[in-house]
Amino acid sequence: MLCPCPRAALATVALVLIVAGPVAGHSELKTVLPGPDDVVDVFPAELVATFSQDLDPARSSLELRDGAGTPVARGGRDPSSRRTMRLALPPLTPGS
């Protein structure tokens, strides 16, 4: 039997895909460093995400949450690139 956490996460992802699917005019995520499956030996100082279109700084943000869903860091559009967002990473424990 699966624990309820993965089911809730899958339901959330499914809802996001259903709601976001019809909106074709939005920017798509092109790259993110470190990537979703990257294993890093040295703790990165920041997360950098690049999108397919220019981002509106008033409507664009990044948020890092812990396993309980509590926000631990926030970031926004890079002032030097209209398509890039940056989030300074706080110290994290291994496996987070």
Image (spheres, grey):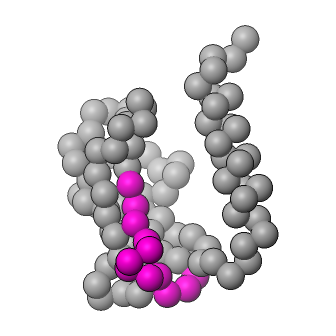
Quarter of the image containing the N terminus? Answer: top right
Q: Is residue 48 above or below residue 5?
A: below
Relative to 84, 19 lies left or right:
right
Q: What residue sits 38% from the left and 77% below the top?
A: 58
- Closer to the camera in the image, 31 or 19: 19
- Farthest left residue in view: 91
- Farthest top residue in view: 1
Residue 11 covered by magenta stretch:
no
Relative to 8, 62 lies left or right:
left
Residue 60 covered by magenta stretch:
yes
Q: What residue sits 63% from the left and 77% below the top?
A: 26
Residue 44 is drawn in which quadrant?
A: bottom left
Residue 69 is drawn in which quadrant?
A: top left
Residue 77 is drawn in which quadrant?
A: bottom left
Counting from the top left corner in percent of width and height, residue 10 is at: 68, 38
Counting from the top left corner in percent of width and height, residue 15 is at: 71, 48
Q: What residue sits 70% from the left and 63% below the top?
A: 20
Relative to 36, 17 lies left or right:
right
Q: Which residues are magenta?
A: 52-63
- Closer to the camera in the image, 40 or 71: 71
- Closer to the camera in the image, 22 or 13: 22
Q: What residue sits 40% from the left and 66% below the top?
A: 61
Q: What predominant SS class does the magenta segment belong to?
A: loop
Quarter of the image containing the C terminus? Answer: top left
